[in-house]
Image: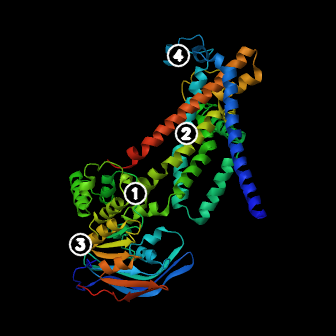
Amino acid sequence: MQPLTQPFIPSSVKIRVSNLSFSYNGREILRDTSLEFPEHAITAIVGPSGSGKSTFLMTLNRLWEELPQCTMGGRVEILLNGIQQNIYAPDCGVEALRRRVGMVFQMPNPLPMSIFKNVAFPLQLAGEKDKNVIRRRVEETLQDVGLWDDVKDRLAGSALSLSGGQQQRMCMARAMILRPEILLLDEPASALDQKAAEAIEQLLVRWKQNCTILIVSHYLDQVKRIADSVVELQGGQLRNRQVATPRV
Amino acid sequence: MKGASVGRFVERAIITFSWLAGAILLTVICAVTGYLCFKGLKTMSPALIFGSTDPMSALLLRQRVFDGLFPAMAGTLLLVLMSVGWAIPIGTAAGIYLAEYAGGGTKKIFNLLFDLLAGLPSIVIGLFGFSLTLFLNRHVSKELHPCLLLSSIALAFLILPYIIRTTQIALENLPVQNRLTGLAMGATRLQNLFHVLLPQALAGMVSGVLLAIGRCAEDTAVIMLTGVVASAGVPRSILSHYEALPFYIFYISSQYADQQELATGYGAAILLLFICLFLFAVAFVIKKNLPCQVFSQR
């Protein structure tokens, strides 16, 4: 298969991780590691299972704070609205951060409500009241993920009735409806068949124009197809790794 | 080889035992309800409920029923609704606090306290209600005496542990993934609780309310000490005496004059079962419809 990647022009640093340490339940997962992630690029994070790839993603939107028995040290700075911000600074609102840094999980996680409500949910959480705005944005976003034609007649139907691939695309629409600057994906295609996985890959390649994407992936061929750079997490250390395939 | 056959025997024995346990339970339920129906069904008629009073005027409270169970049914229904009404907001809030907000030490202490409360015999709660009545009578108003309000408050204490525990467990058993879904979208903890967690935990929480309804409807010890009487008519206010079916059953069974009167006791038991079934049905309908109507927006 042809690599989907478009020419990659390195640009400014979007995420800067410095001296990051993390332990969960007394087990050390990240040990004093530092790395920078470029803007408008897809960075794949690879590594053995259980090496803490998912946990690392959660340090970028502070989601680990909701889990018990986690401790973190070090610094994470993200370029948000053009300003370099320490996301763990006391004045950085965690909800506002998570609206700028979207996340898609490994298993599709639709909420037990209608398709429309699922996709509109983040907008409503953010305080958007105008029904017309909400409706327009839901339509735009569902069109963007290529789900609109499939679901436009059953927006009020339960999101749980969608197929796995459709559910995951709906979850991506939900993560994108707030137009985040960063999208974190935790093996988003691992529960899907090849066709659904390819649809998601194409989306990601398109989205990187406006968004910085970090994707945890187990599949080397997927990584080769879409990633601009690859980071390996092993032994608690993040390291840049050469991408084997030459860029087109 | 020998080990394998012993293992098979043990497995078969466990399966047989499980079947037997289920069968015993079913037999007992059938035997109890069957016996009740056998003894009480012949008394089932409008006369059992309304006596010699015209049903319509009794229902509209125009005429008082003296020789029927209508006042006791009304008393039980009001008692259950009021007790559950007190206990649901407090119990749910306490359950939410324990599951979502309480930290290590506090949580342990509260868990212990609620387990103790759950283990209190109902007669002790009744005594508490009685002492509360005496205290209020002496220090607040001479008008306060054992009544529906005080009974329902005492009963609420009896059922609080069920509601607290089921709320807590329903929330704690939600998969971590569900918990993180809303938060990852930028929901505050409160938004996450109301829009994501509670709707998903609701089914579990309703089962606690069902238990509580049953417990309220059947309890006799608490209400005996806090306001139920053998003859009071339909309660006129929450500050008046009232009748209740379980107390009627207890009263009749301990001092019936003839077989006819005893049969009305069985009739009352069947009515109590039906009231519980009705309340369970209401709770089930609510359980089916609540998540999409109350919590999610538009």
Q: CA distance from mark 2 to mark 4?
A: 26 Å
Question: Does any portion of residue B231 appear in the rendered image?
Answer: yes
Label annotation for residue A231: none
Disc 1 designates what residue?
B191
Tell me the SS state at disc 2: helix
Q: Chain of mark 1?
A: B
Q: CA distance from mark 4 to mark 1?
A: 48 Å
Whether residue B173 is situated above or below residue B231 in the rendered picture: below
Percent x, y for residue A94? Answer: 38, 69
Whether residue B16 is situated above or below residue A172 in the rendered picture: above
Q: Earlier in the sequence, mark 2 or mark 4?
A: 4
Q: CA distance from mark 3 to mark 2?
A: 55 Å
Label 2 amino acid?
A: Val
Contact (Cβ within 8 Å) of mark 2 with mark 1: no
Number of numbered markers: 4
Tell me the SS state at disc 4: helix
Quadrant in the picture for residue A162: bottom left
Disc 4 designates what residue?
B58
Percent x, y for residue A33? Answer: 44, 87
The residue at 24%/57% (across/down) is: A148
Viewer-proximal residue, A240 or B121?
A240
Whether residue B58 is situated above or below residue B238 in the rendered picture: above
The residue at 62%/57% (across/down) is: B110
Other residues around mark 3 within 10 Å, as few (<14) / some (14–19) / many (≥20): some
Disc 3 designates what residue?
A206
Quadrant in the picture for residue A12: bottom left
